[in-house]
Image (cartoon, grey):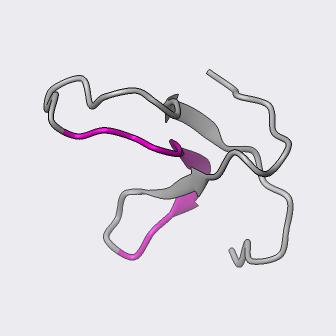
């Protein structure tokens, strides 16, 4: 499924300003999450980054 240019729902599991739960040296300066149902070429869910300049709703 091609999602470029389309509106998608992103599940943010690492909000902007948070740290990785298992690797405390990894900081997330942007919202980091995934697009449910979209698989990337490596077989994992497609990751998504979102900057603070866009309006959004965090879905947890």
The residue shown at (75%, 45%) is 9
- Of residues 47 and 49, the one nearer the viewer is 49
- Side (left or right) of 33 relative to 54: left
- Side (left or right) of 36 relative to 47: right
Q: Quadrant of residue 4?
A: bottom right
- Of residues 39 and 28, the one nearer the viewer is 28
The residue shown at (39%, 41%) is 28
**47 above or below 26?**
below
Residue 36, position in %: x, y?
60, 46
The residue shown at (13%, 32%) is 23
Residue 10, position in %: x, y?
67, 44
- Quarter of the figure that contains the C terminus: top right
Residue 50, position in %: x, y?
63, 51
Does the magenta-highlighted stretch encompass residue 48? no
The residue shown at (81%, 39%) is 56
Residue 18, position in %: x, y?
40, 26
- Quarter of the figure that contains the N terminus: bottom right
Q: Quadrant of residue 41?
A: bottom left
Does the magenta-highlighted stretch encompass residue 37? yes
- Side (left or right) of 39 relative to 8: left
Please provide the residue range marked out in magenta: 26-41
């Amino acid at each position: 499924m091609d999602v470029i240019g389309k509106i998608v729902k992103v599940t943010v599991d690492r909000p902007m300003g948070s740290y990785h739960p298992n690797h405390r040296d990894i900081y997330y300066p942007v919202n980091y999450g995934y697009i449910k149902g979209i698989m990337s070429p490596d077989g994992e869910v497609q990751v998504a980054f979102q900057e603070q300049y866009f309006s959004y709703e965090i879905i947890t």
